[in-house]
């Protein structure tokens, strides 16, 4: 998810505003506290002054004065701590409260993008997307089991009906969201066309977005196209793209198997992304019309091994709901 120049400038301005606001609010808190407790401000100034004198004594190699200033300064520090404690506040409470304490709202740690920047990018440029619009109507509350047959027993599902199978899938999806803070494993939704896989993906996405998690939704075709675009570019460019797909709290890969691309390229890209997300404890949801056997044959055994070992498998069954709605 590479940014255009305009998008990058927008994000930079967003972070500058956030940082400036944190500093301004910190300054206002400090001024208000010192106005109510002028002794605290006087102590702060004297402590700073003594630190300067202590440094000069060090340069003059005046050990006796250094020790005196050190003792004096420490006494003032303790006096200041007691004053703050009596006021029921910590001195650090007067400092800027950055949204991200790691990068202090700069978006960068040394020469690398902070994880907060990557999440902010996803949230900022996804919020007006088709996915966001879909989650307004496609959510757990609107997922209807009425489209699934509740009479016919299915031998392939141990005699359960399609409705019973989908009741279990719906509960599993809700449980996945409820436990997302502690366990971010993967989910594979497999089944024939129109059985509700994309709808349930949107339910999960919408619920996690409302809980302030970052969600990146992408079709398998778009994912592999973007990975292919950097295959022959610089190595660091390829790493950046991989990192961006690894950054979101939840990555949804829709319609795996419908893409038109080299199987070898798709297999390598899929394994790299899944592996990175598993290592970083990030959730991944995949919807596909392929069976587990077809996934192994198409994308390699190591991809299948990752899915079987790290993913919850939800098998979908029923009529083509999209077609049924049209006919109705």
Image (cartoon, helix red, strand yellow):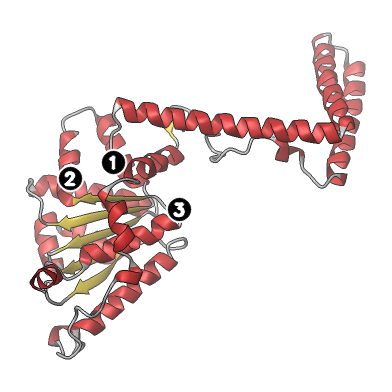
Is 307 in front, or is 92?
Answer: 92
For numbered disc 1, what is the local secondary structure?
helix
Horizontal relation, residue 286 to residue 101: left or right? left
Q: Nearer the viewer, mark 2 or mark 3?
A: 3
Quick check: 193 above or below 61?
below
Q: Residues within 10 Å of mark 3 (few under 14, many from 20)?
A: few
Residue at which label 2 appears: 222
* Residue 108, visible in the rendered structure: no
The disc, 2 or 1, on the residue closer to the chain's N-terminal end is 2
Quadrant showing the N terminus: top left
Quadrant of the rendered image containing residue 65: top right
Is 78 in front, or is 122?
Answer: 122
The disc, 1 or 3, on the residue closer to the chain's N-terminal end is 3
For numbered disc 3, what is the local secondary structure?
loop
Q: CA distance from mark 2 to mark 3?
A: 25 Å
Quadrant of the rendered image containing residue 188: bottom left
Residues under numbered marks 2 and 3 in contact, where contact means CB atoms less than 8 Å apart:
no
Horizontal relation, residue 21 to residue 77: left or right? left
Residues under numbered marks 1 and 3 in contact, where contact means CB atoms less than 8 Å apart:
no
Residue at which label 3 appears: 212
Q: CA distance from mark 1 to mark 3?
A: 23 Å
List x then y, in percent, for residue 278.
Answer: 34, 54
List x then y, in percent, for residue 269.
Answer: 20, 46
Horizontal relation, residue 181 to residue 321: left or right? right
For numbered disc 2, what is the local secondary structure?
helix
List x then y, in percent, for residue 137.
Answer: 30, 62
């Amino acid at each position: 998810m590479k940014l255009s120049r305009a998008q990058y400038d927008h994000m930079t301005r967003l972070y500058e505003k956030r940082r400036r606001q944190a500093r301004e609010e910190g300054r206002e808190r400090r001024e208000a506290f010192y106005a109510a407790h002028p002794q605290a401000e006087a102590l702060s100034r004297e402590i700073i002054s003594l630190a300067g004198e202590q440094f000069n004594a060090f340069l003059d190699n005046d050990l006796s004065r250094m020790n005196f200033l050190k003792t004096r300064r420490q006494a003032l520090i303790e006096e200041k701590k007691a004053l703050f404690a009596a006021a029921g506040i910590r001195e650090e409470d007067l400092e800027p409260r950055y949204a991200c304490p790691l990068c202090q709202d700069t978006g960068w740690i040394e020469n690398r993008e902070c994880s907060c920047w990557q999440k902010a990018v996803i949230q900022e440029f996804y919020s007006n997307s088709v996915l966001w619009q879909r989650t307004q109507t496609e959510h757990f509350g609107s997922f209807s089991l009425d489209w699934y047959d509740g009479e016919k027993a299915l031998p392939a599902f141990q005699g359960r009906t399609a409705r019973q199978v989908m009741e279990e899938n719906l509960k599993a999806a809700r449980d996945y969201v409820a436990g997302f803070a502690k366990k971010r494993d993967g989910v594979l939704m497999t089944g024939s066309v129109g059985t509700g896989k994309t709808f349930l993906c949107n339910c999960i996405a919408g619920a996690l977005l409302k809980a302030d998690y970052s969600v990146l939704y992408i079709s398998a075709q778009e994912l592999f196209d973007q990975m292919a675009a950097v295959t022959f570019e610089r190595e660091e460019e390829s790493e950046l793209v991989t990192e961006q797909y690894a950054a979101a709290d939840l990555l949804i890969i829709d319609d795996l198997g419908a893409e038109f691309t080299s199987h070898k390229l798709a297999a390598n890209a899929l394994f790299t992304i899944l592996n990175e997300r598993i290592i970083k404890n990030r959730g991944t949801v995949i919807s596909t019309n392929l069976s587990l056997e077809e996934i192994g044959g198409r994308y390699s055994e190591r991809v299948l091994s990752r899915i079987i070992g790290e993913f919850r498998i939800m098998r979908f069954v029923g009529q083509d709901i999209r077609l049924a709605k049209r006919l109705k």
